[in-house]
């Protein structure tokens, strides 16, 4: 079906078009955004070990991603408990709900190892709602986007150490790709479990937000193999992001990126996405009436 979202994706696929329209939007919003940022009281942010938002924006523009400030231990603990007491959904399917303690049972029901399970409607939890209005995130997002940011989505999901099919790895973003969620958008990823090389790090290709080498050298596909990435950008540009529970990566995921399938331990991640426009296709809101718990 034809939608605003699909139209946006068609029109803004080309970087030149995207950047030109974005610059006009920034120009038109320059006063409003200053006013908005001045209204953010950064001392009220609960994020820890933070510098001024400007200190991150330059690296973000250059590299496409930057390590950000962390969640407090108390928030990590709360969010881990939230993940235990709320159903998640196998393969992001609202009809395949289960509690994380029943992972073996859902795998038996599906007759396959499960790579990913996502939560829906987490933005309505009070702690998540408070974090989604965090003055540091809002100020940084406003500075980066050049407009008063809108909350596009809040997403929380598990990835599990399984031998997943190629189809599941592609469908769950475990293959290099870029997102085109709006003219300009930004994501804050928070690990809620410790993440090292064995537990499915997020990986991005440094500088691929600015330097689009795949346009002519790759097929037009939105998915790229590791070999294509390494031969185009060099192994030194491929950054695996490790961190303890609570740590944060701020990324404009127009940058090439992927999740790695964990080898040994599952990974739980919470993501906030801010943008200029919002689209229901990107939100992680699902009518509770459509959600079914099956094990
Ligand atoms: O799981 C990951 O680290 C990758 C997430 C991703 O591809 C995305 O949010 O666009």
Image (cartoon, rainbow, N blue to C red):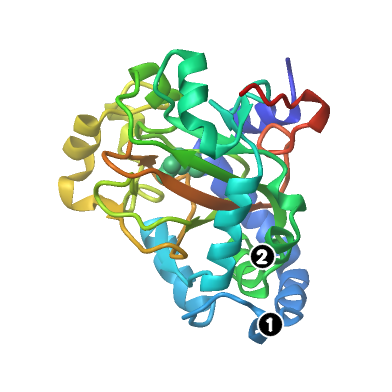
Relative to 232, say whether 220 is above or below: above
Would residue 184 be seen by someone viewing this image from the given angle?
Answer: no
Give the mark nearer the N terminus: 1 vs 2: 1
Asked if the residue at tag 2 contacts the one at tag 1, i.e. Cβ–Cβ closer than 8 Å, the answer is no
Residue on which the image places disc 1:
44
Q: Is residue 48 left or right of residue 289?
A: left
Element type where label 2 sits in the image = helix
Q: Residues within 10 Å of mark 1 (few under 14, many from 20)?
A: few
Residue on which the image places disc 2:
131
Would residue 45 be seen by someone viewing this image from the given angle?
Answer: yes
Expressed as whole percent of the image width and height from the top left, the position of residue 151 reads: 71, 53
Picture residue at 35% right of the left edge, 31% below the top: 175
Relative to 250, say whether 73 is above or below: below
Mark 2 within 8 Å of ligand 1, using the beta carbon: no
Relative to 271, say whether 256 is above or below: above
Relative to 210, say whether 100 is above or below: above
Picture residue at 77% right of the left edge, 51% below the top: 124
Label 1, label 2: how many angstroms apart (C-alpha)? 11 Å
> Which quarter shows the C terminus?
top right
Element type where label 1 sits in the image = helix
């Amino acid at each position: 079906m034809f939608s605003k979202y699909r139209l946006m994706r068609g029109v803004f696929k080309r970087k030149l078009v995207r950047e030109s329209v974005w610059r006009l939007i920034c120009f038109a919003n320059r006063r409003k955004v200053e006013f908005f940022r001045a209204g953010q009281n950064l001392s009220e942010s609960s994020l820890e070990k933070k510098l001024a938002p400007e200190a991150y924006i330059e690296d973000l523009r250059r590299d496409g991603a930057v390590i950000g400030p962390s969640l407090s231990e108390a928030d990590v603990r709360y969010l881990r408990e939230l993940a235990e007491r709320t159903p998640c959904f196998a393969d992001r399917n609202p009809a395949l709900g289960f509690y994380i303690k029943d992972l073996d049972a859902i795998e038996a029901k599906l007759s396959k190892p499960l790579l990913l399970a996502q939560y829906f409607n987490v933005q309505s939890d009070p702690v998540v709602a408070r974090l989604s209005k965090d003055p540091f995130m809002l100020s940084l997002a406003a500075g980066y986007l050049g407009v008063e940011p809108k909350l596009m989505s809040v997403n929380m999901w598990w990835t599990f150490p399984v031998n997943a099919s190629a189809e599941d790895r592609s469908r769950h973003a475990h293959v290099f790709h870029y997102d085109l969620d709006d003219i300009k958008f930004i994501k804050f990823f928070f690990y809620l479990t410790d993440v090292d090389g064995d537990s499915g790090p997020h990986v991005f290709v440094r500088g691929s937000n600015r330097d689009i080498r795949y346009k002519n050298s790759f097929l037009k596909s939105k998915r790229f193999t590791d070999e294509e990435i390494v031969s185009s950008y060099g192994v030194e540009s491929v950054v695996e992001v490790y961190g303890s529970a609570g740590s944060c990566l701020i990324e404009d995921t127009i940058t090439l990126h992927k999740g790695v399938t964990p080898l040994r331990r599952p990974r739980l991640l919470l993501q906030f996405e801010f943008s200029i426009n919002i689209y229901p296709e990107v939100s992680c809101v699902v009518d509770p009436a459509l959600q079914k718990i099956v094990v």
